[in-house]
Amino acid sequence: MLQNLRLKANEYLLREQWDQAIQTYSQFISLSENQKSLTLAYSNRAEARSKTRDFDGSLKDCDEALQIENTHFKTLMLKGKILLNLDRYTSALNCFKIANLDNPSNQDLEVLKGYLEKCKKVEFLSRSGAFDFSTWVLNGFKGKLPELAEFIGGLEIKKSEISGRGLVANKNIDVGSLLLVTKAVATERGILPESKNEDLGQNAQMVMWKNFIDKVLESSENCERTRFLMSKLSNGENEEGLEVPDISMFRPESGQDCRFVGEKIDIAAMLSILDVNSLVEEMFSSKFTGKNGDYHGVGIWVLASFINHSCNPNAKRYHIGDHVIVHASRDIKEGEEITLGYFDVFSPLKNRKEMAKNWGFDCHCKRCKFEDEISAKNETGEIEMGYERGVDVGTMVYKLEESMRRWMVRGKMKGYLRASFWKVYSELFVSEKLMRKWGRKVPTMEVVVESIVEAVGGDERALRVVSEGMKRNGGGGVLEMEKVMKLGRGVYGKVMKKQALRSIIC
Ligand SMILES: C[S@@+](CC[C@H](N)C(=O)[O-])C[C@H]1O[C@@H](n2cnc3c(N)ncnc32)[C@H](O)[C@@H]1O
């Protein structure tokens, strides 16, 4: 009977009928006492479980098999691959190293060598944050994606002055430095047609959202750690009362510390968490918009979900594959909270308030407070109205600069207001005709961009205006080039060599 069960289970495995294979191996395991056969049965059930994405169950089976035979090659390879997929690089490397002791055949040895190399690489990246996207960038964002691994820079989770908890720098961080790289719990991507038929567009969006929710639920059901970490996220209610978790639990190897066995998923709570924390993917560069303009991706990245919004953000994010990459978009001081722009911060206060409302909150950032105060005390209405009516941009910039002088607006605050009316500044700076008329009466483009970037961080649009201005002036000198490269690091991060950065900017 045991022989029959084993043959049947093996057949299911070969036919990729995973559920039947799991069931039949389970029967076999409950009856057999032969150690060698048990090793194989656990190992095979582990394989079937990994195919159904039940990684916790699969890892438990691997451990059962390894308890009987601690150098079992097939099991060690499977365990290593699962751990690698779960971003537990050091444990994965250990498995592959032990597998190497089992005298593998030549063919197996080749595969094993590949995994050993990959593990060493990602383990180093995860420790050092020394990512290098140069080849990918120089290839025009085509071909193999750059190697990525989870990484956490000099950060802590603390109570935020903005709302609930936030990520805070625990050292000075200079512009372009990587802050974190996190793999998604789940993502869903698709083409959302910008159809005239609104129902069609909304339908496609609903399908995408539903598929996304299913994927998140599946990932959470199959992995205790994911369930545990997801439960730490805000559902938008009573943020001030939320626990402040230690950042170490988000480190790749923290899987072993997770004690969450048996907890069931509360679907309503999960939906609120997704509502508050899901992000729409942003591509690396406008040159790399992901096939076409209708292409959209949504996902959830746990640690990145602790980053609050600010209209004067100091960080930027973009997505490559399933990873989100967050870097400093300007210099950050120790103790400063890391913030992202959830929406376009190059917009006037009124528009930003609407966008924050769509996100479900009233923005509590410094810039909004300042702009609220200044518009309460002064006549900003005329400027805003001019903006909406599309008054001559030269007149608008001149008026705003004159008003800031009268209102005694200084330092970063100037950058805040200039960023609010970026649209008119940029239109003025790119028009040779308008600049001939207004050039002497308004500050230079370099001064304006520098003040904006200092206040709200690097931005691709500002970078473009500066690099085009430089081209118009014959390419600029070494000093100008250095400034543009610094601006570029604020936009893309320190993830590529100079030559690659230059290829995107120029
Ligand atoms: C992705 S979570 C950010 C982390 C959150 N503070 C926490 O404790 O988990 C997004 C939520 O944080 C709050 N939030 C983020 N930025 C904010 C801001 N500038 N002003 C007010 N609330 C903000 C809002 O409740 C928003 O729905």
Image (tube, rainbow, N blue to C red):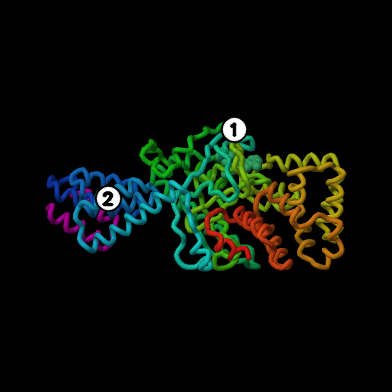
Q: Position of residue 249 (x, y in %)?
A: 44, 38
* Mark seen at residue 240: 1
- Is 372 one of the magenta-colored residues? no
Name the side, left or right, on which 288 lies relative to 367: left
Mark 1 surroundings: few (<14), some (14-19) or many (≥20) residues within 10 A? few
Name the side, left or right, on which 392 lies relative to 249: right
Name the side, left or right, on which 148 lies relative to 235: left
Q: Position of residue 149 (x, y in %)?
A: 44, 52
Q: Which residues are magenta?
A: 1-28
Residue at the top extreme of this rendering: 241
Q: Is residue 457 visible?
A: yes
- Is 3 one of the magenta-colored residues? yes
Cα separation, mark 2 vs mark 1, equals 46 Å
Q: Circle 2 is placed at which residue position?
A: 97
Query: Does 11 appear above or below 237?
Result: below
Q: Is residue 23 visible?
A: no
| Residue drawn at 40 percent across, 40 percent down | 254
Q: Position of residue 86 (x, y in %)?
A: 39, 49
Q: Quadrant of the C terminus?
A: bottom right
| Residue drawn at 79 percent across, 61 percent down | 428
Query: Does 408 appear above or below 22?
Result: above
Residue type at tag 1: Glu
Label 2 sits on a secondary structure element that is helix
Label 1 sits on a secondary structure element that is helix
Q: Position of residue 422 (x, y in %)?
A: 75, 55
Residue at the front extreme of this rendering: 478
Q: On the image, which quarter does residue 252 sit in? A: top left
